[in-house]
Image (tube, helix red, strand yellow):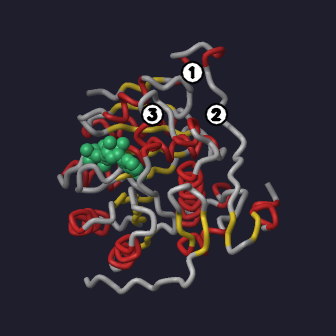
Amino acid sequence: MYTIVCASQKGGSGKTTLSGHLAVEACRAGAGEIALIDTDPQGSLAAWWNVRQAPAPHFVKAVMGDLEEALTGLHQAGIKIAIIDTPPAITQSISKVVSHADLVIVPTRPSPHDLRAVGATVDIAERHGKPVIFVINAATPRARITGESAVALSQHGTVAPVTIHHRVDFAASMIDGRTVGEVVPGSQSAKEISDLWLYIQERLSRIVRDPDLLPELKPEHLAVNSLLTVTEAGVETATAPVEIAPAVVAEAPVLVEGPERRSSLERRVLVEPRSHERRAFGRRSNDHPFWGAK
Ligand SMILES: Nc1ncnc2c1ncn2[C@@H]1O[C@H](COP(=O)(O)OP(=O)(O)OP(=O)(O)O)[C@@H](O)[C@H]1O
Ligand SMILES: [Mg+2]
């Protein structure tokens, strides 16, 4: 079993939103049995999962002291990937959670406050020798500070080539236990999440050297992702000219099995066709070998 930890000292950076969305996307992508672990006493992820109708992903609420036991239980239950949401803090216990990680995801808003806070999270990951991926979250479309933030973050480590933009979809979809991919499957928000998971799955497979984890579809299109801008209408166009941003210097865990909660008639089908249409540099998505293969 592999473990992804969503951590950042800064409150409200998107740890819970990304944990839930990535776990659902991992299920949709067929990455195996996925479990979410909520270690945050605020219980936001637990509240989301409790109103969720779909059986996947599995869910565990664990207090920090029981995490090890929870992970062992999930491993024995055949879970392939556990995604852990953590509270906004830098404590001994967060450090302990990170010690179990194969990969640490640090959601960061493109703001000076968030950027200043990343150092503490990175220190913990480095102390445990854990790889970090920054995900810029809640970015304003076409804002210059997004590129500048990416440059600033790159001083500390890898920045995901997929930026998650600020959209009401992300909050609204979570009201009734769903995600943007389930509520608005063809949207830009859904595309961002599926691209982000594709990237993370690929990175994880390389980090843990598990070729079975390699996504069937190679995330080659992500190489040009950051050269695209998102308009208010949600249509992507190539930026021309491409502006190079100047650098900013820098209790016993309770395993709740999803399928037991709902009758099968009530379950929604998780795997929905990905009908995203994209246009990059004037080329239709279905002309591209990557998308054409789908
Ligand atoms: N990309 C986004 N677009 C719009 N709203 C977002 C986005 N990401 C997160 N939010 C909203 O921002 C708020 C904080 O997000 P979230 O709860 O995921 O952060 P967090 O890091 O888990 O917070 P905490 O540190 O308190 O646990 C929530 O209301 C969420 O709906
Ligand atoms: Mg949270």
Residue drawn at the location 68% of the way across and 60% of the way down: 278
Quarter of the image with the C terminus is bottom right
Front-lying residue, 191 or 212: 191
Q: Secondary structure at mark 1?
A: helix
Q: Which residue is mark 2?
A: 270
Of badges 1 and 2, nearer the viewer stands: 2
Location of residue 290 with respect to 87 vertically, above or below: below
N-term-proximal mark, 3 vs 1: 3
Question: Tag 3: Cα neighbours inside 10 Å, few (<14), some, or many (≥20)?
Answer: some
Front-lying residue, 3 or 279: 279
Q: Position of residue 196 (x, y in %)?
A: 54, 58
Please state the quadrant of the image where ligand 2 appears.
top left
The numbered mark at residue 45 is none
Q: Secondary structure at mark 3?
A: helix
Q: Which residue is mark 1?
A: 259
Q: Position of residue 176 (x, y in %)?
A: 45, 27
Residue drawn at the location 36% of the way across and 30% of the way down: 46
Residue 86, can we see it?
A: no
The residue type indicated by label 3 comes to Gly
Location of residue 170 with respect to 288 vertically, above or below: above
Task: Determine which quarter of the picture holds residue 251.
Answer: top left
The residue type indicated by label 2 comes to Leu
The residue type indicated by label 1 comes to Pro
Q: CA distance from mark 3 to mark 2?
A: 25 Å
Q: Position of residue 19 (x, y in %)?
A: 43, 45
Residue drawn at the location 55% of the way across and 15% of the way down: 262
